[in-house]
Image (cartoon, rainbow, N blue to C red):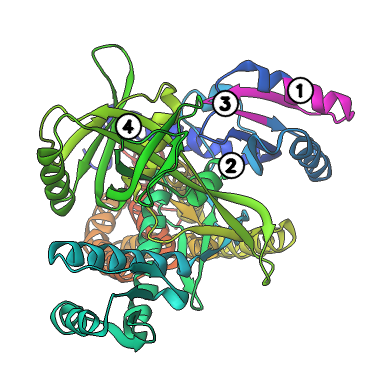
């Protein structure tokens, strides 16, 4: 029989609509101004911090909506933004040195919805606000590495050729100075050794001294490499946070802009983005004692519990060669970090451990922290902090894969693995400006976006009802269902962020959905004018309009795919929203309206349609 749907089709449509409403519902609850407190190494591992924060707020008579401790961090929800700022200052003043304290916006979604993984849509900077970081790359550190590389290579070459020299030292402007016994030796080194050094400028100085300086082109390339690699590492770290629409771009010669639209865990983001941790593997000098005069090529380093070791200044391997790191539990139920090296790093480690079996090798954890001081430009000066996290004897030749033990805190091990896995900064980086995109512009954008969407829907509804009567009303119901399904799907998809262009995509898909119903209704009217019966006209109208609707949506989808492929940021957001809208509009405009029409007219003897 024409225009009849089986029961299972109606059940499927009702289930889809139910889940669409369910996952769209969290968007009605809004957000609470909040403060997130996270440990310096990624987590708060004891309840004392929770109690301490609660006491701070009570002491300053700051009323909070709730204080929760979960997933290694404390979240304080406040009634309004003024109390949020007041509480943030109070907490920073009391415990800011030991914890990361950051402003946040926490969804006010009820627990029963959160338990069903129903969360509100992530909004972009222009709709929800978010975190804006201006980060400065310490280019001098990158050039210092280049200077150290030349220093190590030259010292190794002089030692290999058995050429005596009086002094080899670092000088200004990232150059080296090497002083020889006589002019003949100096000229021999310049001719036989330094002639093989590329991208350097060699000058004769007084007292049989050579000055080896990096040329301008090499310094420029080193700067460019440091910026580009740090941008790539920031992208990797942001991926670890689960964000897909973050904006990362270069500004000037040494700055990087990072925008995190819709970011909620701002404390975690700040910690991961600004953490500058790496590893160095060094040989332990067991022949030297801490309490005597140390050789020039050795220095003393300490473990966290204060034990001192004498290490060679020469670095066997740095974290630059680490391509992957994970954590696991060893046979003694202790946390360990599993390291994978690239080919070059694996060859270096294999060669070194083969020649030093039986000797001790230390793993030095290095981190750059804010010293609290500022340079002449007003920027924070970074302080290099290091500690030995592992000392082990080399029992056999190692390769590209090995493990580091001795990290007793599992959270710290996970944090270290994450940083090493996402990449080690080529040059230290620090946040010089942090801004939260304010509510004024956000409120204005949301107001304008909602007005545009509302007026578009109202005009479409008015047109459809006046033009097609009952069929227009059915199309209106489908239009509203389409809007709910778009919001529900956008809320459910991970990593999707709604921006102003995304709202434009929603309006566009609603228009496309209206166009589909216009095609169907006009086809039905044509069939009636051609003398078809009512039931046949409905059937043929939907059938003949189907191919035209499919063709129109496929061409739109192709454009959307192109936009998503070549676009970035908000353009991708527009493409995602439009693609979701195309899928839901096909469901509601064709199947949804047909189901309602079948309920009203299907299987009945009717002589006239309200169309």
Q: Would residue 356 be visible to someone looking at this image?
A: yes
- The reply, left or right, for residue 536 in relation to residue 99 is left
**Residue 155 image offset from top left, x and y in percent:** 25, 64
Instruction: Point out which mark residue 44 bears.
Output: 3
For the record, the magenta segment spans 52-75
Mark 4 or 1, nearer chain start = 4
Q: Residues within 10 Å of mark 2 (few under 14, many from 20)?
A: many
Is 54 magenta? The answer is: yes
Is 573 magenta? The answer is: no
**Residue 587 image offset from top left, x and y in percent:** 34, 48
Mark 2 or 1, nearer chain start = 1
Instruction: Point out which mark residue 493 bears.
Output: none
Asked which secondary structure carries label 3, the reply is loop
The residue wearing badge 2 is 267
The residue wearing badge 1 is 54
**Residue 216 image offset from top left, x and y in percent:** 37, 86
Mark 2 or 3, nearer chain start = 3
Marks 3/1: CA–CA distance: 14 Å
Of 361 and 244, nearer the camera is 361
Marks 3/4: CA–CA distance: 46 Å
Of 575 and 285, nearer the camera is 285
Point out the frontmost of discs 4 and 1: 1
- The reply, left or right, for residue 453 in relation to residue 87 is left
- The reply, left or right, for residue 410 in relation to residue 12 is right
Asked which secondary structure carries label 1, the reply is helix
């Amino acid at each position: 029989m024409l225009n009849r749907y089986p029961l299972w089709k109606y059940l499927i449509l009702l289930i889809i609509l139910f889940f669409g409403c369910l996952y769209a519902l969290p968007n009605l609850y809004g957000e609470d101004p909040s403060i997130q407190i996270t440990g310096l190494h990624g987590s708060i591992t004891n309840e004392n911090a929770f109690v301490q924060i609660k006491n701070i707020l009570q002491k300053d008579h700051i009323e909070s909506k709730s204080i929760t401790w979960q997933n290694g961090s404390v979240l304080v929800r406040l009634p309004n933004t003024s109390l949020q700022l007041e509480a943030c200052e109070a907490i920073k003043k009391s415990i800011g040195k030991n914890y990361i304290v950051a402003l946040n916006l926490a969804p006010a979604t009820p627990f029963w919805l959160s338990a069903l993984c129903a969360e509100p849509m992530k909004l972009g900077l222009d709709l929800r606000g978010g975190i804006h970081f201006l980060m400065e790359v310490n280019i001098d550190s990158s050039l210092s590495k280049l200077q150290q590389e030349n220093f190590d290579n030259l010292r190794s070459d002089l030692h290999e050729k058995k050429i005596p020299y009086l002094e080899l030292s670092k000088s200004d402007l990232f150059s080296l100075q090497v002083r020889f016994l006589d002019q003949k030796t100096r000229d021999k080194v310049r001719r036989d050794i330094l002639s093989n050094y590329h991208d350097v400028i060699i000058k004769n100085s007084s007292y049989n001294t050579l000055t080896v300086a990096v040329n301008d082109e090499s310094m420029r390339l080193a700067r460019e490499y440091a910026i580009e690699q740090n941008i790539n590492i920031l992208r990797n770290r942001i991926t670890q946070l689960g964000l897909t629409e973050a904006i990362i771009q270069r500004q000037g010669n040494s700055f990087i802009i990072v925008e995190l639209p819709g970011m909620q865990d701002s404390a975690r983001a700040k910690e991961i983005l600004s953490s500058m941790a790496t590893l160095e593997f060094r040989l332990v000098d067991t022949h030297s004692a801490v309490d005597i005069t140390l050789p020039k090529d050795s220095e003393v380093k300490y473990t966290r519990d204060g034990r001192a070791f004498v290490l060679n200044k020469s670095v066997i391997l740095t974290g630059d060669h680490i391509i992957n790191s994970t954590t696991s539990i060893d046979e003694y139920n202790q946390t360990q970090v599993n390291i994978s090296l690239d080919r070059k790093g694996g060859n270096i480690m294999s060669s070194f451990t083969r020649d030093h079996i039986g000797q001790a090798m230390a793993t030095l954890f290095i981190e750059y922290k804010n010293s609290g001081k500022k340079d002449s430009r007003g920027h924070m000066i970074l302080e290099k902090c290091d500690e030995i996290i592992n000392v082990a004897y080399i029992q056999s030749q190692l390769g590209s894969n090995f493990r580091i033990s001795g990290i007793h805190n599992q959270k710290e091990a996970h944090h270290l693995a994450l940083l090493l896995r996402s990449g080690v900064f080529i040059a230290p980086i620090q946040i010089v400006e942090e801004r939260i995109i304010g509510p004024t512009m956000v409120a204005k954008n949301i107001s304008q976006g909602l007005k545009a969407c509302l007026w578009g829907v109202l005009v479409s509804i008015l047109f459809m009802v006046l033009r097609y009567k009952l069929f227009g009303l059915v199309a209106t119901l489908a239009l509203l269902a389409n809007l709910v399904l778009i919001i529900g799907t956008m809320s459910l998809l991970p990593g999707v962020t709604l921006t102003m262009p995304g709202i434009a995509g929603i309006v566009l898909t609603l228009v496309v959905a209206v166009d589909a119903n216009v095609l169907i209704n006009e086809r039905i009217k044509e069939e009636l004018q051609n003398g078809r019966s009512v039931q046949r006209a409905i059937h043929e109208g939907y059938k003949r309009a189907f191919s035209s609707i499919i063709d129109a949506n496929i061409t739109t989808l192709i454009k959307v795919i192109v936009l998503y492929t070549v676009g970035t940021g908000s353009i991708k957001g527009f493409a995602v929203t439009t693609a979701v809208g195309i899928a839901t509009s096909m469901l509601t405009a064709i199947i949804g309206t047909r189901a309602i029409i079948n309920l009203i007219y299907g299987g009945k003897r009717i002589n006239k349609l309200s169309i």
